[in-house]
């Protein structure tokens, strides 16, 4: 395989970041699809990691799940992807700032989960209701 050349250190670090997702099969319970080359995807693959172009894309849920079915991923999965990336980078380049970011992302996931539990208790989870 040909070694890539980078014009900036930032380009190299972005690729290193996405490599932390290599082999990850799910993010927050949502199946991922890794692409080495651009290819068609299955309709249920809402998170796509494409190593050829060093990208990750998310298809976001469109409308409430109970009204529209699952047709995308939730914000929770995007936060979990960020957490996986930073955690992977922190293993390679540990620092206080990464550790704090990891803690804050974990906290964000906790609050999103609390919101979901509250909405479930009130019977409004999955609907366009407050």
Image (spheres, grey):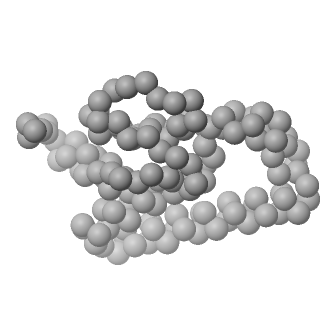
Please tell me which residue lies in front, 91 or 26. Answer: 26
Q: Is residue 47 left or right of residue 29?
A: left
Work out which residue is located at the far right of the displayed protein and give it.
Answer: 122
Relative to 64, is 84 above or below?
Answer: below
Q: In which quarter of the image is residue 24?
A: bottom left
Relative to 55, is 13 above or below?
Answer: below
Work out which residue is located at the far front of the displayed protein and give it.
Answer: 42
Q: In which quarter of the image is the N terminus?
A: top left
Relative to 43, is 107 above or below?
Answer: below
Q: Which residue is drawn at 60% across and 43% down?
A: 73
Q: Residue at x 38, y 57 (%)?
A: 85
The answer to whether any part of residue 114 appears in the image is yes
Residue 20 in percent (x, y) is at: 32, 56
Q: Quadrant of residue 2?
A: top left
Q: In which quarter of the image is residue 82?
A: bottom left
Please tell me which residue lies in front, 118 or 28. Answer: 28
Q: Residue at x 43, y 24 (%)?
A: 40
Residue 61 in percent (x, y) is at: 66, 38
Residue 39 in percent (x, y) is at: 37, 25
Residue 36 in percent (x, y) is at: 29, 36
């Amino acid at each position: 395989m040909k070694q890539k050349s980078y014009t900036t250190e930032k380009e190299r670090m972005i690729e290193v970041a996405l490599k932390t997702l290599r082999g990850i099969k799910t993010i927050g319970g949502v199946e991922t699809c890794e692409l080495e080359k651009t290819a068609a995807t299955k309709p249920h693959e809402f998170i796509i990691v494409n190593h050829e172009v060093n990208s990750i894309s998310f298809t976001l849920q469109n409308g409430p799940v109970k009204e529209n079915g699952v047709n995308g991923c939730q914000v929770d999965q995007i936060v979990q992807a960020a957490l996986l990336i930073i955690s992977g980078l922190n293993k390679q380049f540990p620092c206080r700032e990464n550790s704090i970011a990891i803690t804050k992302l974990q906290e964000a996931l906790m609050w999103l989960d609390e919101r979901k539990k509250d909405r479930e208790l009130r019977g409004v989870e999955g609907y366009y209701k407050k």
